Image: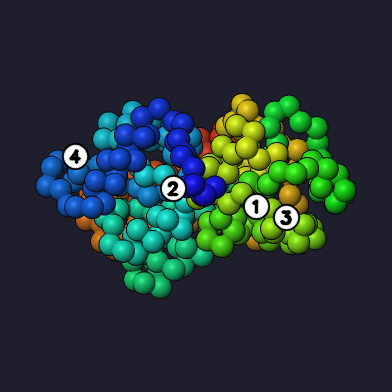
Amino acid sequence: MTWADRPFAIGRRGFVGLFLAASLLAGCGSSTGEAETAPVVFAAASLQEAIGDVSEAWVRRGHRAPVVSFAGSSALARQIGAGARADLFISADEAWMDALQDQGRVVVASRAVLARNRLVLVAPAPAAPLDLRDQGAFDAALGEGRLAIADPEAVPAGRYGKAALTALELWPRVEGRLAPAENVRAALALVERGAAPLGVVYATDARASERATVVAVFPATTHPPIVYPIARLTRSDNREAEAFRRFLLSDEAAAIFRARGFAAGAES
């Protein structure tokens, strides 16, 4: 079993079921009223709690709960590119949205930045702060272990992490000692259970964890801006999809995202 193959639990009530439901919908069409009115959303794994909270607010307004599938942006984009049925896609970077747009799978006029994030280094709790510019301290904290990180060749969190570590001249020290994971939450899980002494994750992931603690924040200048673009997909014929997209971009939803540690899309 590789690091990326290790099991990953979603960790938000009800969302394992939502993931399975979305997978079924992606594999085949449906004529039920539920499928016609509940939008299917493919969303980056780091958005679990925030999207859950927004979905609850949406339901309180009298709508059906959206069917949400959380995974790495790369995996979701590839599924959409292969024909999976979904109404909305929320990526953790612009690159995977660009790829789908180039394939003609995105309604360009619907594309917008939903939220922003920060990149941090975490260790199993409790842990002392670490100076990222002190290579000796970094080596000591990593010890004989591996650095947990989302796949740096494909997953946005891993790409941001590689860029930041490269800028800080740490990448050559860790390149051969990675524990690559299929998404950022899987990387966090490795740190939480002590399988890796350090991990690169988003600030919001660390905030949602009780078993990992932030030991350093990567300077924003060391990596591209972490943005979450949202767009409606061209294959979507769901009547609620555009309304839910607009709700996700509303002031009410922005307040929910901020409460979960994100910056709103319009903020820098």
Q: Are marks 1 and 3 in contact (CB under 8 Å)?
A: yes
Would you name the residue on which mark 4 appears? 34
Where does residue 220 sit, x and y in percent of width and height?
Answer: 72, 54
Q: Are marks 4 and 2 in contact (CB under 8 Å)?
A: no
Would you name the residue on which mark 1 appears? 178
Sequence-earlier tag: 4 or 2: 4
- Looking at the picture, which amino acid does disc 3 mark? Val
Sequence-earlier tag: 1 or 2: 2
Sequence-earlier tag: 2 or 3: 2
- Looking at the picture, which amino acid does disc 1 mark? Leu
- Looking at the picture, which amino acid does disc 2 mark? Ala
Q: Kindly state the secondary structure of the residue where label 3 is placed.
A: helix
Camera-nearest residue between 61 and 127:
127
Where does residue 50 sit, x and y in percent of width and height?
Answer: 48, 37
**Residue 190 shown left or right of residue 174 in the figure:** left
In space, the residues marked 4 and 1 are separated at their CA atoms by 43 Å
Would you name the residue on which mark 3 appears? 174
Where does residue 47 sit, x and y in percent of width and height?
Answer: 49, 42
**Residue 139 shown left or right of residue 14 in the figure:** right
Which residue is painted at 66% across and 40% down in the image? 196
Around disc 2, counting alpha carbons within 10 Å, would you say few (fewer than 14), some (14 to 19), or many (20 or more)? Answer: many
Would you name the residue on which mark 2 appears? 71
Q: Are marks 4 and 3 in contact (CB under 8 Å)?
A: no
Around disc 4, counting alpha carbons within 10 Å, would you say few (fewer than 14), some (14 to 19), or many (20 or more)? Answer: few
Sequence-earlier tag: 4 or 1: 4
Residue 96 appears anywhere in the view: yes
Q: Compared with residue 103, is residue 219 higher up or lower down, i.e. above or below?
A: above
Q: Compared with residue 152, is residue 37 higher up or lower down, i.e. above or below?
A: above
Which residue is painted at 63% across and 57% down in the image? 160
Q: Which residue, as the protein is rendered here, is positioned at the far front?
A: 1
- Looking at the picture, which amino acid does disc 4 mark? Glu
